[in-house]
Image (spheres, rainbow, N blue to C red):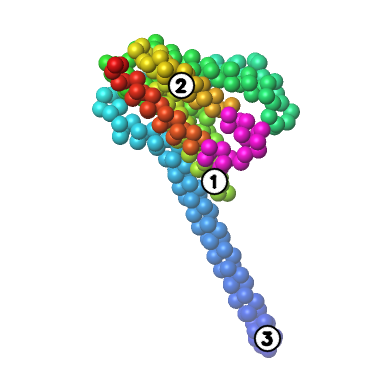
Amino acid sequence: MIYKSVFSGLIEGPKQIQSNKNKTICSSQIQIENWGQKIRRKMTMFHFFNCAILTFGPHAVYYSATPLSEYDTLGTSVKAALVYLGTALVKLVCLATFLKVSENDGFDPYQELLKAVIGFIDVAGLYFALTQLTHRNISQNHKFQAVGLGWAFADSVLHRLAPLWVGARGLEFTWDFILQGLEANANLVLSISLAALGSLMWLRKNKPKTLIPIIYACAGIVATMPSITSYLRRGLGWHFPKVVGFELFTSLSMAFISWQLFSACQRPSS
C-alpha cells in the first residue's frame, strides 16, 4: 500500500503542476485580451476625437480668429444654422417627392439635373438668411461671414456627425472619416464664398456692371458643386480621395475669386 501511494503521488504530482501551469497561461491570455480590448477602445475613441476635431474644429477656429468673435456675431450664425435646417427639410421633401429610387448606382443625367435644380433651394435659403433675418449692427463683411459659418456648421452636423459617431468608433481603421473632415473644411470655404457672392448680388447696389456676370457665374458654380462632385464619382468613376482633392482645390480657387470680386466691388467707382 505504501508503494502504491508513493507511486500514485509521483504520477499525479506532475499532472497537477501541469494543470496549474495551464490555468496560469489561460488567465494570462485572458488578461492580455482584456488589455488589448481596452487599448482598442481607447484608440478608436482617439480616432473619433481626431476626426471630430478635423471636421468641426475649423469652424470654431474661424470664429475665434476673425473679428466675428469681437463683434459677437454668434447669434447671426445660429440663425443661419436654423435657416439651413429648414432649407434642408424642404429639400428632403422635394427629393422624396420628385426623385425616383434608382436601381443601380450609375449616373443618371435627368436625376442629377433635377437634384441640381432642387439644390438651388439652398440659394433661396441663403438669400433669406442674408436679407430677411434681423442682424446686430454689424458690417456687410461680418454679416456674410457669420451667415456662411453658421450655414457650413449646420451642414457638417447634419450630414457628418452621425456617420462619424457610428463609423469612426469602429475597430477597423479607415481613412474615409479623415477625408470627410477635409471635405467639411472645403464645404466651409465654399459656404463662406457663396455667402460673399450672395451679399454682392443682393446687398451691394453700386457694384461695377462688368463684374455682375462673373459674380452670378461663380455663384452658380458654387451652388452646383454637389452635382459636379456626384458626376465625378458616378459618371467618371473618381475615387473619394480624388474627389476630396478636387473639392479642396475648387474651394480655395473660389475663395480667392470671391475675395477679389468683393474687394473690387468695395473700391470707389471712378
User: Which comes before the other along the chain, label 3 or label 1?
Assistant: 3
Identify the element where label 1 is drawn: loop
Kindly identify which residue carries mark 1: 175
Camera-side residue of 143 and 171 = 143
Kindly identify which residue carries mark 3: 7
Camera-side residue of 238 and 259 = 259
Extent of the magenta region: 228-246
- Disc tally is 3
Would you say residue 51 is visible in this rendering?
yes
Camera-side residue of 81 and 198 = 198
Identify the element where label 2 is drawn: helix
The residue at 25%/27% (across/down) is 70
Identify the element where label 3 is drawn: helix
Q: Nearer the viewer, mark 3 or mark 1?
A: 1
Q: Position of residue 100 (x, y in %)?
A: 70, 20
Q: Nearer the viewer, mark 1 or mark 2?
A: 2
User: Which comes before the other along the chain, label 2 or label 3?
Assistant: 3
Indicate whether residue 161 is drawn in magenta: no
Amino acid residing under circle 1: Trp
Q: Is residue 270 left or right of residue 15?
A: left
Amino acid residing under circle 3: Phe
Asked if 208 appears above or below 224 in the picture, the reply is above
Report, in whole angstroms, how far the alpha carbon at label 3 lies from the one at label 1.
65 Å
Give the label on residue 214, or none: 2
Q: Label 3 neighbourhood size at 10 Å, few (<14), some (14-19), many (20+)? A: few
Give the label on residue 135, or none: none
Asked if 137 appears above or below 31 in the picture, the reply is above
- Quadrant that contains the C terminus: top left
The residue at 64%/82% (across/down) is 9
- Quadrant that contains the N terminus: bottom right
